[in-house]
Image (cartoon, rainbow, N blue to C red):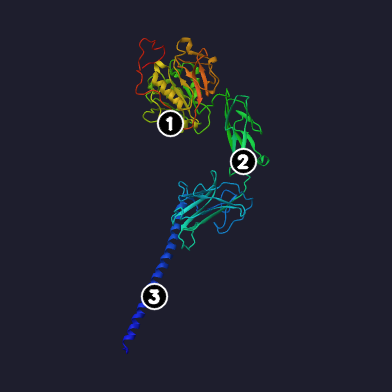
Amino acid sequence: MKISAPFLPNYSWRGFQLRQLVVYVFLLLLLNSCTESMLKDEDISNDLSLLSQSLSKEFGKLGISDAANGGSVDEFYFLAPTVAKSPKYHKNFHPNLSPVVEISDDLGFKNFHAVFNRDGSADGKVVVNPLEENYFVDWNPSQTKAQIGKIYRIRVRIGEKVLGHMDVGVVPSNQTKALQDGIIPAVQGQNFRVAFRLEEKECPARIEVKPSEATVVIGGEQRYEAIVYNFYGEVLTDFEFLAVKWSIADGEIASIDQDGLAIGKSFGSTQVKAKSFDVEGTATLFVQEVETAPRPGKDIIVFNDMNVFDNSIGLVNPNNRLLVRNLINFETIGPRANGNSIWFDCGKDSRYPLACSFTDGIHTELKFLIQSLGFDLGIIDSSVNPLIDIPMDVKVLFLWLPRSPYLLNEINSLKKFAEQGGRIVFIGEFNLFYEEIGFRVQNHFLENMGSGMRNVGGNFACFDIERQIPLSSLRPHPITRDMIGATFACASKVLTGANDYPLVYDPFNREVLASVAQINTNPISQLTQFRIDPNNRTNSNPFENKQWPYPGVITD
């Protein structure tokens, strides 16, 4: 067959063009892929660098914090392959600890991205390798859904003590460019090993003094013990090396020897101190009249008679004025110890709201007396503004004859107030004035505060000479300190429980008229049952055919 010459060259040229086009397209796609990869690589590095600079404004310099990189714990090191090269270390490896490795993307650890512990009950397990003398975890960013281009902080802690941390940036698998600002790359889809070393620690980090608080009488003794812990929370027992030194903050109140034996010298409270190297632990010693009585603060005092504090009966007696002084001016421990504010609450449908008036009623002198003792006086109505988040300068709360129950969050707020060193004074009354609903509210309140005290009615010390409470009816306590008597007028009986301490008895030393108890400051999840409907309150004036009013007792 004869083939014409013009046909063959034409076929070859077209094939060449087609092949050239295919190669060009291939090279273009390849170049585009490489360029995209390079741009992604460059973009991730730049993004992480900008993010690092932004985070450093809030959290300081990012990177690694361990013994080799400016960390505060000399016995903690990150090791290779986590870091490029393992540092030099000096002490014995400690294989018996329970470190926790935590990862967070907010650096402040408000939220946790992943958690690893020794038993593996969290997101993974912390493994100890005794032969290579290290601990490690393997973190796969893909499995925990870590985001590319984000910085995560990995920290190691034992108990509440953070030993060190490192900051990593999650990068794609094709990342080739080194990260800046001390950020270590963690590759998406690959295990990132966090390897670290913990060494034995012999120096003290914390001292616990037991008991944390105690009460003795003048001349009484209390033995204290110092338990010394290292940074890992282990108890140190090399007492010769620790050389604990004992001291007392106020030598006028008490003394202490180098065996931890304290002796009370005068009324008051002081700190007991135990020191080893530059670490110090403290406890509190109260020196008061009776060892078994509740110490001041963190307490509630019940008076079922408001006339103890009125203008014309109670405060005429200098002893009652001393009582007011002792109630508000006392030494305690906690953040409220130096509080200078006293609050009166006449809310909750108070049976006598005039107790909170500066111009009317029978308790105006009480307010002036409190102010003359150097305290500010605040008047509140918890029916309008519930007793929540009580300001820290408030030291004492007077609750005046409430007839509506306190709410659950108020009860827990008052427990917290007491835990901080605050004092609650509950003013009740006898049954003809306070009524059944008042008794129910008062006893419900006391029960929820963890006290066994109850208002059980009756009226004592009502007339003439019976109102004068002799010294023999007072029980020794800082609240009755320096008093040689008191004046009451128709007080209702206080029934006391096993942990309550009577302060004042009637003139015949038979019935308790005032008492104090330590508050159970543990929060509660629900109130105890209230045993009367507050909407069915007894009539305020059911006094026909009764000896009412008694002399000196104020009615409506």
**Residue 123, image x and y in percent?**
49, 49
Q: Are marks 3 and 2 in contact (CB under 8 Å)?
A: no
Assign a secondary structure to mark 2. loop
Residue under circle 1?
A: 526
Assign a secondary structure to mark 3. helix
Q: Few, some or many C-alpha atoms within 10 Å of disc 1 (few <14, some 14-19, many ≥20)? A: few
Residue under circle 2?
A: 235
Q: Which mark is residue 23?
A: 3
Disc 2 to disc 1, how far (Cα)? 39 Å
Q: Amino acid at mark 2?
A: Val
Of residues 477 and 211, the one drawn nearer to the viewer in this rendering = 211
Disc 1 to disc 3, how far (Cα)? 79 Å
Q: Few, some or many C-alpha atoms within 10 Å of disc 3 (few <14, some 14-19, many ≥20)? A: few
Assign a secondary structure to mark 1. loop
**Residue 318, image x and y in percent?**
49, 17
Counting residues from the N terminus, which is met first, the one under dot 1 or under dot 3?
Answer: 3
The quarter of the picture where residue 238 lies is: top right
Tell me if residue 387 can be seen: no
**Residue 228, image x and y in percent?**
61, 39
On screen, 8 above or below 251? below
